Image: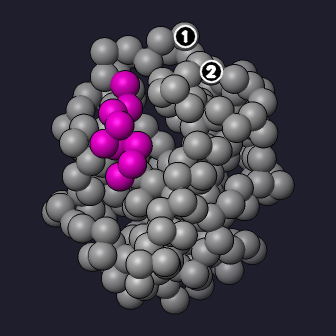
Amino acid sequence: MRTVTIDELRAIATEARVRIWDAAKAAGREPKIYLHWSAGHYSSFFDDYHINIDFDGRLILMQPLDAHLPHTYMRNSGSVGISLCCGYQATSNDLGPEPPTAAQIEAMAQAIVAVADGLWLTIDKLHVLTHSEAADNIDGLTPHEPYGPNNGCERWDLQYLGTAESPRFVYDHDDPRTGGNVLRGKANWYRDQWKKSS
């Protein structure tokens, strides 16, 4: 467990690229990045995820990016799990006393870019999904029966963020206010800005 910068995370992902792609290909697909919240307290870290993001936006590398971890049911081979440390007592009506912070949301968007750059991935719904989106199989894969917001709502991580851009729970995964759409939008914005400045 150690704190890493965005540049360090990009380098770590680049170094793990071949191994992650090989594992994904063995599962019959391309690599994935899955976005979670821990449903725990700020500053409580879990090694089910490769990267934890503290309340202040610090990136905590928990495991090597090519480690096979149990973060997303039936989807863990050749994938990277990133989790916000938050969501304690969250419900679909109220994100509770420890909702995602602005620093966490921006850090997650930047971490998406770093990992996607290192793995040579497009930042879209086929490659970067929240747990709620993966649970409903919105990427067209069907490794399991759906169990997300549209199918029992067992897992709905980041379906909304509690921000002005993503203020409330919605069921439609195409709605621009879902957490996944907001996070991918922010990640693509950061990617564009960083390309312009390099």
Residue at (67%, 79%) from the top-left corner? 26
Q: Main secondary structure of the magenta part?
A: helix
Q: Residue 150 occupies which quadrant of the picture?
A: top right
Residue 141: give x, y in percent of width and height.
Answer: 79, 56
Question: Mark 1 and mark 2 in contact (Cβ < 8 Å)?
Answer: yes
Q: Amino acid at mark 1?
A: Asn
Q: Which is nearer the N-term, disc 2 or disc 1?
A: 1
Label 2 sits on residue? 169
Residue at (70%, 38%) from the top-left corner? 176
On the question of residue 93 being in view, the answer is yes
Residue 89: give x, y in percent of width and height.
Answer: 38, 16
Residue 79: give x, y in percent of width and height.
Answer: 54, 65
Residue at (23%, 32%) from the top-left corner? 42
With respect to residue 119, does 77 lie above or below?
A: above
With respect to residue 11, does 145 lie above or below?
A: above
Decide: few, some or many residues near mark 2? Use Cα within 10 Å; few <14, some 14-19, many ≥20: many
Label 1 sits on residue? 93
Query: In the rendered image, which quarter contains the C terminus?
Result: bottom left
Q: Residue 32 occupies which quadrant of the picture?
A: bottom right
On the question of residue 115 being in view, the answer is no
User: Which structural element holds mark 2?
Assistant: loop
User: Which structural element holds mark 1?
Assistant: loop
Report the magenta residues as a range: 99-107
The Cα–Cα distance between marks 2 and 1, rounded to whole angstroms, is 7 Å
Decide: few, some or many residues near mark 1? Use Cα within 10 Å; few <14, some 14-19, many ≥20: few
